Image: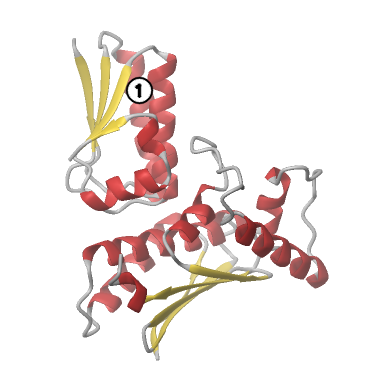
Amino acid sequence: MNHLKMTIKEGLTANNVAVYQKEFEKILTEIDDFSELILDLAGNDNIDSTGVTFIISVFKRAKAMEKSFRVVGANADVQMLFKLMKLDQFFEMSD
Amino acid sequence: MVIYETTFHSTFELVDEKAKEALMMLKAREIDWMSHTLFKINFVLRELLNNAVEHGNAFDPQKQVFLRIESKDQLFIFTVRDEGAGICTELTPTDEGATEKLPRHDKAYHAICANETLERLKHSTDDTETDVDALADRRRGLETIKRLAFELTITGNTVVATLDLSKEAMQ
């Protein structure tokens, strides 16, 4: 498999992150045959710093597994936030 | 003028619910909101409320979080108060050169912590200040609020974030 794509459909907020984290860990125990991990945030503009921390944890996990990582579907506001937090220097993001 | 006011128990689910209600009340105002301004408000509001639930009230569902949103001319003022010891107990251990500080609960300590926090936030606007590690697990929220052009005032366990809408148009 070339890439593994995870899509976040609900808000990337503190009340949802624990569920995302659990699902993410479950997927990684089942699937290892990929070279790139893609996080899709399409249609999602509801985000808080706990959500940002989740994305960082996914990035760190991908890096530890020697996989590439990028964020897609990020709208202009989300991209602005990531740049403000200087996360754009660590991984690629696009709309 | 008070736009929205509520008190709720300390859960992230209620933060989500109250933040959505607050945004609806703001959108209902006769203001030509820019989408990035509402995005910023949503982020900052959630940050303040999450901080109150997690670090202020330590997820104690019996402790409450108070939120008030009011407007004065072009200023939008977000006041969040919890029943905890204040956010200083989270922030100070990571300050450069600071030794470990244990949480305390007297009012004098609250005042000192609030002042320390404000001073740190003021100094962090200096170009010489080393940026907070972008991948660090802590301190990200308050630093980001500052970078989003909200003015912060912290007194004990009450945080007031003020957004000047007249400056938003220039961004």
> Callout 1, which amino acid?
Lys
* Quarter in which the C terminus of chain A is drawn: top left
* Position in image of residue B167 (x %, y %): 36, 73
Subunit of mark 1?
Answer: A
Q: Quadrant of residue A18?
A: top left
Q: Quadrant of residue B133?
A: top right
Query: Who is closer to the viewer here, B41 or B143?
Result: B143
Is B108 positioned to the left or the right of A51 in the image?
right
- According to the picture, the residue beneath numbered tag 1 turns out to be A26
Residue B56 in view: no
Compared with B95, A4 (above or below) is above
Is A80 positioned to the left or the right of B94 in the image?
left
Query: Who is closer to the viewer here, B20 or B36?
Result: B36
Residue depicted at 42% across the width and 41% down the height: A86
Is A78 positioned to the left or the right of B113 in the image?
left
* Position in image of residue B56 (x %, y %): 62, 60
Residue depicted at 18% across the width and 42% down the height: A42
